[in-house]
C-alpha cells in the first residue's frame, strides 16, 4: 500500500516494468485459464441440470443425465492436448 507521507510520484518511479519473473506470469495465467475453463464447464452443467429438472414436465433423471453427458463431452473437449511439434 502506498505510504501517505510521500508523494505518489515516488511510488510510480519505484516501479520497475517487467520486474516479475516470467515463470510467475506463466503459472498465474495458466492457473487463471484453467479455473475459468473448468469453472465455466461446471456452471454450464449445473445450469443445464437445473433447467431441465425444473421446467414444466421436466424430471430429475432427465436433467441429471443431460448434465452428465454435457460434462463428459465438455471434459474431453477442454482437456489439455499434447503440444504440436
Image (cartoon, grey):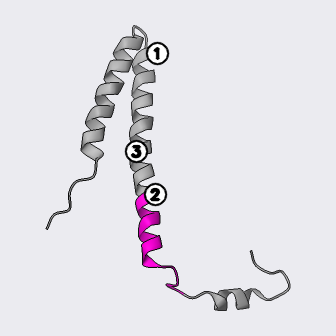
Q: Where does the magenta region start and end?
A: 17-31
How many residues crowd around disc 2 within 10 Å: few (fewer than 14), some, or many (20 or more)?
few
**Label for residue 6?**
none
Q: Quadrant of the C terminus?
A: bottom left
Give left or right: position of 70 versus 12: left
> Which residue lies under the disc numbered 1?
54
**Residue 21 percent coordinates (x, y):** 47, 79
Please identify the dominant SS of the magenta region: helix
Q: Quadrant of the N terminus?
A: bottom right
> Which residue lies under the disc numbered 2?
32
Residue sitting at x 79%, y 89%: 7
Report if the CB atoms under discs 1 and 3 are less than 8 Å apart: no
Residue sitting at x 45%, y 22%: 50
> Which mark's residue is nearer the viewer, 1 or 3?
3
| Residue 21 lies within the magenta run | yes
Compared to 15, does 74 lie above or below? above
Residue sitting at x 43%, y 10%: 56
> Which residue lies under the disc numbered 3?
38
Kindly report the distance in space between the C-alpha atoms of the residues bearing marks 2 and 1.
32 Å
Along the polypeptide, which appears first: circle 2 or circle 3?
A: 2
Residue sitting at x 43%, y 16%: 53
Amino acid at each position: 500500500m502506498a505510504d501517505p507521507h510521500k508523494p505518489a510520484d515516488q511510488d510510480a518511479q519505484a516501479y520497475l516494468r517487467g520486474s516479475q519473473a516470467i515463470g510467475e506470469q506463466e503459472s498465474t495465467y495458466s492457473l487463471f485459464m484453467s479455473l475459468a475453463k473448468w469453472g465455466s464447464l461446471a456452471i454450464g452443467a449445473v445450469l443445464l441440470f437445473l433447467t431441465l429438472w425444473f421446467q414444466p414436465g421436466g424430471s430429475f433423471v432427465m436433467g441429471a443425465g443431460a448434465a452428465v453427458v454435457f460434462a463428459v463431452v465438455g471434459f474431453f473437449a477442454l482437456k489439455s492436448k499434447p503440444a504440436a511439434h
